[in-house]
């Protein structure tokens, strides 16, 4: 069974190993036995490979042999055959981003991270007694790793190194000031990455983005900073729950980040990474119900109703309800019947477009402490001036 070299170009290292074994042994079942893996693992992985190739326009079994360049996907293929069934002409129509492509990307990333699960070193349990009645919530408003800003143009310098330094410094201060709550909730509220591809444009609108360095490096440094954030929280809290919200700047990269964190911490029972693809996400803590979303899909006023509809039992059994969002880059708190909706600032500087458009919000990160019976009981703020010598940012 010869290997399709074009298909091989879409494969991960593991998929190449599977393809080589299939070629050598003649079938997927025999290949699985030779590699000491389950037959289903080989079938699933190679199915994922074919889906990824097909999303790019390569499916020779269906006469599709003209692959589309990333980040385009094939919207449709029209083939003209002659009377003998031979192909005469073919039209390949492409477009950016659709549900099928996103599904293929998710499966590809899952397969890619399979081999690195559980490599995180264990962090020692907190030495102090922990209060199980308290939850420390760390909302991260639009970190925008990869954004580039020049001080002379925007009022503040910002690049990948600055993003990492500010995030690390902020989480250090907030964890140090937080009470010894047994549980922590890290809610990254979307747009962790400034761009989603090497094209340096938003996928939905095609707007040009000011990006520092290459996309692959942005992904690496962003993951490194998030791993450190989780480890710092583990030093203070026994249990850490992580939710990475998809933003309009990082629709696909956000899920890659969540999957990488889940793989890295998979052997640590104290870490839980939520991988739900839902736009609206909820977390129950005693009489407290917390919702989270990026903020680009619904107005603030609609969020309490969405929460009540999505979580009717939890809505009825809780007293204190909070919906957290990012997207707008400024602080805004609105109280609606039964629910408080809050938008959070970012640590990121303004890019050239936002600076020219007149955006001038402050920059900070916060820790909100919830009590299971009384809701929010305290909060801690780390302003940009606390972690940089430049106060006029």
Image (tube, rainbow, N blue to C red):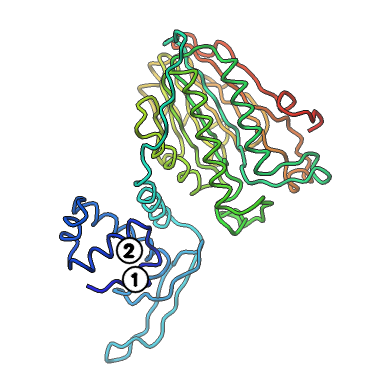
Q: Pinpoint residue 86: horizontal percent, then vertical percent.
A: 31, 88
**Residue occupying the point 43% across, 75% down:** 66
Whether tag 1 and tag 2 are in contact, CB under 8 A, the answer is yes
**Residue occupying the point 67% across, 50% down:** 212
Closest to the observer, 365 or 325: 365
- Describe the element under mark 2 as helix, strand or loop: helix
Q: Label 1: few (<14), some or many (≥20) within 10 Å? A: some
Would residue 187 appear left or right of 65 to someone viewing this image? right
Quarter the C terminus occupies: top right
Q: Pinpoint residue 31: horizontal percent, then vertical percent.
A: 20, 60
Q: Residue at label 1?
A: 59
- Which residue is farthest right? 152
Closest to the observer, 21 or 349: 21
**Residue occupying the point 40% across, 50% down:** 109
> Which callout, 1 or 2, points at the residue further toward the start of the chain?
2
Closest to the observer, 164 or 187: 164
Q: Pinpoint residue 186: horizontal percent, then vertical percent.
A: 50, 28
**In the displayed structure, would residue 139 be above or below residue 70?**
above
Q: Label 2: few (<14), some or many (≥20) within 10 Å? A: some
Q: Residue at label 2?
A: 50
Distance between the Cα atoms at labels 1 and 2? 7 Å
Would residue 308 appear left or right of 349 to someone viewing this image? left
**Residue occupying the point 32% across, 90% down:** 82
Q: Pinpoint residue 297: horizontal percent, then vertical percent.
A: 53, 41
């Amino acid at each position: 069974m010869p290997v399709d070299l074009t298909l091989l170009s879409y494969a991960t290292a593991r998929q190449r190993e599977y393809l080589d074994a299939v070629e050598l042994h003649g079938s997927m079942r025999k290949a699985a036995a030779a590699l000491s893996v389950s037959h289903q693992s080989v079938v699933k992985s190679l199915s994922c490979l074919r889906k990824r190739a097909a999303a790019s326009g390569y499916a020779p079994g269906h006469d599709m042999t003209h692959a589309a360049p990333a980040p385009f996907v094939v919207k449709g293929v029209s083939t003209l055959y002659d009377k003998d069934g031979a192909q005469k002409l073919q039209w390949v129509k492409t477009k950016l981003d659709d549900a099928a492509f996103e599904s293929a990307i998710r499966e590809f990333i899952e397969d890619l991270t399979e081999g690195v699960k559980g490599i995180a070193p264990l962090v020692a349990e907190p030495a102090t007694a922990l209060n199980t009645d308290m939850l420390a919530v760390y909302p991260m408003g639009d970190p925008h790793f990869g954004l580039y800003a020049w001080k002379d143009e925007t009022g503040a310098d910002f690049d990948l190194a600055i993003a990492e330094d500010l995030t690390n410094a902020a989480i250090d201060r907030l964890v140090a000031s937080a009470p010894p709550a047994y549980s922590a909730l890290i809610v990254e509220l979307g747009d962790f990455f400034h761009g989603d591809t090497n094209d340096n444009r938003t996928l939905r609108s095609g707007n040009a983005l000011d990006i520092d360095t290459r996309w692959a490096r942005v992904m690496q440094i962003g993951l490194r900073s998030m791993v450190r954030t989780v480890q710092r929280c583990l030093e203070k809290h026994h249990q850490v729950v992580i939710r990475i919200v998809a933003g309009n700047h990082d629709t696909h990269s956000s899920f890659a980040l969540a999957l990488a964190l889940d793989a890295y911490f998979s052997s640590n029972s104290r870490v839980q990474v939520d991988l739900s693809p839902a736009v609206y996400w909820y977390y129950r803590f005693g009489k407290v119900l917390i919702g989270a979303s990026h903020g680009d899909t619904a107005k603030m006023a609609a969020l309490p109703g969405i929460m009540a509809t999505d979580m009717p039992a939890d809505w009825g059994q809780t007293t204190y309800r909070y919906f957290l969002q990012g997207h707008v880059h400024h602080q805004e708190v609105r109280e609606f019947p039964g629910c408080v909706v809050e938008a959070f600032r970012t640590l990121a500087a303004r890019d050239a477009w936002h600076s020219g458009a007149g955006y001038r919000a402050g920059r900070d990160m916060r820790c909100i402490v919830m009590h299971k019976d009384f809701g929010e009981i305290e909060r801690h703020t780390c302003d940009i001036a606390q972690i940089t010598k430049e106060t006029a940012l």
